[in-house]
Image (cartoon, grey):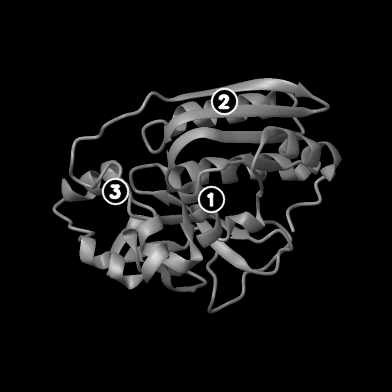
Amino acid sequence: MAGREPDRGTSADLGARVEYRGIRLGTVADVIFDSRLRTVIGYEITGLDGAVRFLPQIACAGAEAAYVEVALPAAILGGDALQFYRKQGVSLLSLEDAGTLAGEAADAFRPARNGYTSPRMTAAFNASATDAGNGIARVSVAGEADLYTAPELKAALIGAIDGGARSVLVDLSRTTFIDSTTLGVLMGGVRRLRPNGGEIAIVCRDANIRKIFEITLLDRVFAIFDDVDEGMAYLSGADGAGPG
């Protein structure tokens, strides 16, 4: 994020290598701070497969100016990405590795709904944008928002922003699953909106999905509401104030 120099020894610069046990996973595309620009809460990672994902600070074993060591690959790698590395003869993850994070953090990043090796069972997915007035767009998301469906979500979100929306309400009321690729898409939207004082707010009632925002500390970036009316009221009067 512009205007803030990462804290050496606890954060990494743009372009820093991201590795797991000496295996390169990608590079840092952006350093993500909380809404007050005081604490690094994670990184946007461009993987070797070209996908952009969110890596929460809690999933890092350590970070310095030119290097990030990942403690839990499950936090940024889904089934397709794991296959990408396996085809190169690299084994990145066993389920035991989830033990590097305790309890709820490990559970939040283990996509048991799809699994790492089982055939993917895809719920019907849809992402659509509508003009809600007052410079606000609503992006409604249904089904599983993951690596497979991220391009459709990104197209809806960027289309709304390029269409003139100052802020966006992302409605996850009918969303059954999100992964780190989805978080990366949402953070990309934040980067586009912030120069003009806009932001993204989230509607979500699913406890498991909300837990992912809380564990990754992205609830400090996104204001999260139980229903659409609350989210719309917040964005209508927020003036880019940010959550908290």
- Mark 2 or mark 1, earlier in chain: 2
Percent x, y of residue 167: 74, 36
Which residue extends farthest left? Answer: 89
- Mark 1 or mark 3, earlier in chain: 3
Q: Is residue 14 visible?
A: no
- When the figure is inspected, residue 153 is found, relative to residue 183, above or below; the finding is above
Percent x, y of residue 112: 29, 48
Q: Could you say which quadrant of the image residue 32 lies in?
A: bottom right
Report the front residue among 106 and 206.
206
The residue that appears at 52% across and 71% down in the rendered structure is 65
Mark 2 vs 1: CB contact within 8 A? no
Report the front residue among 15 and 124.
124
Kindly identify the amino acid type of the residue bearing the numbered disc 2: Ala
The residue that appears at 52% across and 68% down in the rendered structure is 12
Residue carrying label 1: 210
Give me the disc on residue 34.
Answer: none
* Separation (CA) of disc 1 from disc 3: 17 Å
- Mark 2 or mark 3, earlier in chain: 3
Between disc 2 and disc 3, the foreground one is 3
Q: Could you say which quadrant of the image residue 67 lies in?
A: bottom left
The residue that appears at 51% across and 61% down in the rendered structure is 215
Side of 168 relative to 88 (left or right): right
Which residue extends farthest bottom? Answer: 9
Q: Check disc 1 and report its element: helix, strand or loop.
A: helix
Kindly identify the amino acid type of the residue bearing the numbered disc 3: Ala
Kindly identify the amino acid type of the residue bearing the numbered disc 1: Arg
Residue carrying label 2: 156
Side of 138 relative to 53 (left or right): right
Residue carrying label 3: 112
Q: Is residue 235 visible?
A: yes
* Separation (CA) of disc 2 from disc 1: 22 Å
Mark 2 vs 3: CB contact within 8 A? no
